[in-house]
Amino acid sequence: MKKLMKKAPYIWVSDFVYGGIDGAVTTFAVVAGVQGADLPVAIVLILGFANLLADGVSMAVSKYSGDKAEKERIQRIRRLEYKSIREKPQEERAEIEDILRDHGFTGKALESATHVITKDKDVWVDIMMKHEFDVVEEAIYPLKGARTTFLAFNVVGLIPLIGYIFKPVLPVSTDAIFIVTTLFTMLALFIVGTIKTRFTDETWWKAGCKTVLVGGVAASLAYLVGYLLRGIA
């Protein structure tokens, strides 16, 4: 349990990466589509902020629902295992012996290990959950996960809109703002992508470049659609 609590802060990092990448990609795709269609800056801001709010809420709700369902599933399995231990202790003990035997325990070592495990019902249940259902107890906090996802989506997703927010006071063209926005959005995606390597063995720069590539492809497609549909409004 102590190890689980020490690892818990990294859960928020994964949620931040998840929300941040999606926020930057979808908002920048909106910006690129509007830019391709050569629509007014007001349209960029309207669609951009609508995307931030609506998609941010949608992602947060999905994250909450998914985590809550997984937590309830694990709790249900745990309850069933405790019930089995109470009602069928000999059968459950035999299963522990089979598990240990598969791991090379024999003779007195098998008997001793079985006794130690079955003496602590929490440990007993943990092992049964892992080997029967391939379930490992995790630190799952649905509300905190949803909140982190929503904040990341909006914070990182706001980057593609910053230039357009200040367009009225900037002495530059919309095309120039789009170029600068593209550079800063790709940089944000690269940084968020490198954070993913906290949970993988992938090289940091490869992870960053892949994330930039995903954002670039999505934005390019959105720009192309906007360009092809230019003038129909």
Image: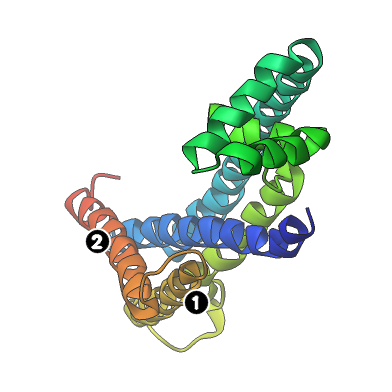
Q: Position of residue 91 (x, y in %)?
A: 66, 15
Q: Which mark is residue 163?
A: 1
Mark 1 Cα-neighbour bin, 10 Å: few <14, some 14–19, many ≥20: some
Residue that extends furthest to the bottom in the rendered view of this protein: 171
Say if 65 sits above or below 183 in the image: above
Say if 26 sits above or below 80 in the image: below
Residue that extends furthest to the front in the rendered view of this protein: 107
What's under tag 1, amino acid-wise?
Gly
Q: Can residue 20 be seen in this view?
A: yes
**Callout 1: helix, strand or loop?**
helix
Determine whether, in the image, residue 50 is placed left or right of residue 117.
left
Front in this rendered view, residue 83 or 230 = 83
Q: Position of residue 33 (x, y in %)?
A: 32, 56
Q: Residue 220 carries which label?
A: 2
Q: Which mark is residue 73?
A: none
Q: Quadrant of residue 217?
A: bottom left
Mark 2 Cα-neighbour bin, 10 Å: few <14, some 14–19, many ≥20: some
Q: Quadrant of residue 128?
A: top right
Determine whether, in the image, residue 72 is placed left or right of residue 226.
right
Front in this rendered view, residue 83 or 205 = 83
